[in-house]
Amino acid sequence: MIEEPDNMTASETTSDAEVSASLDPAQRIAALEAELQDMKDKWMRSEAEQANLRQRTKRQIEDGRAYAVQKFAKDVVEAAENLRRGIESLPPRSYGEPEIVTKIRDGFEGIERSFVGLLERNGILRIDPTGSNFNPEMHQAMAEQATTNYPPGTVLQAWSQTWMLNGRLLRPAMVVVAKAPESNSVYNNQ
């Protein structure tokens, strides 16, 4: 005895069998070939969808690994910036300065080189924007300064550097941007 699937009734099975029996062999072959082609198309779409899902999942996992440390990296960058501020707060290097000041400066600079090298090996890059064109995606304008020495939109000074994590912005630079000097046209008209 042949068991019918639960979702099909006996009348549905009988009607399919009657339709198949009523077709001549050529029509039956054509119907089966059409059904086979439909199944092949569905299978191909399913395979393509599975391949896309695997690629998307792989990319999400890679992104997750690359950027999982983003919060930690921001904190580490803050420490690197504080180290730079400490170095900059030392008096300028001068002939005859006390040996202790020279040793402190050299020590801090060595630590900074080592620290920045460690960051770079782990995908965290520091970029000095001074002299480049202002880019709102990479820079945060803190002030504008009128000047004729540089074209408007040029970064004149960086209060902090741009920091990138594996090619993605981690922290924008805080910058001073050049602007055109104001014209004295009000005074010329009088």
Image: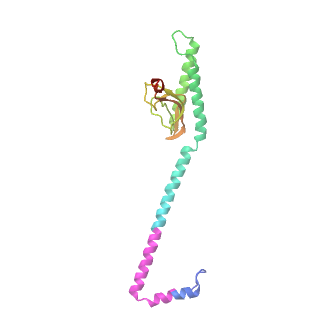
Vertical order, 190 against 31 (above or below): above
Vertical order, 17 against 177 (above or below): below
Which quadrant would residue 188 be assigned to in this image?
A: top left
Of 170 and 26, nearer the camera is: 170
Going by the picture, which residue comes out furthest to the left?
26
Total of numbered circles in the picture? 0
At 51% across and 86% down in the image, what residue appears?
16
Going by the picture, which residue comes out furthest to the top?
96
At 54% across and 44% down in the image, what residue appears?
66
Place of residue 175 in the rendered image (x, y in percent of width and height, measured from the top left)? 52, 30
Q: Quadrant of the N terminus?
A: bottom right
Place of residue 128 in the rendered image (x, y in percent of width and height, measured from the top left)? 49, 30
The colour scheme of the drawn protein is rainbow
Of 100 and 174, nearer the camera is: 174
Place of residue 79 in the rendered image (x, y in percent of width and height, measured from the top left)? 60, 30
Going by the picture, which residue comes out furthest to the front?
190
Vertical order, 46 against 123 (above or below): below
Would residue 183 be seen by someone viewing this image from the given angle? no
Would residue 70 be seen by someone viewing this image from the given angle? yes
At 47% across and 34% down in the image, what residue appears?
134
Residue 26 located within the stretch drawn in magenta: yes
Place of residue 90 in the rendered image (x, y in percent of width and height, measured from the top left)? 57, 18
Of 137 and 74, nearer the camera is: 137
Vertical order, 6 against 50 (above or below): below
At 59% across and 37% down in the image, what residue appears?
74
Residue 80 located within the stretch drawn in magenta: no
Main SS of the magenta part reads: helix
**Region rendered in magenta:** 16-43
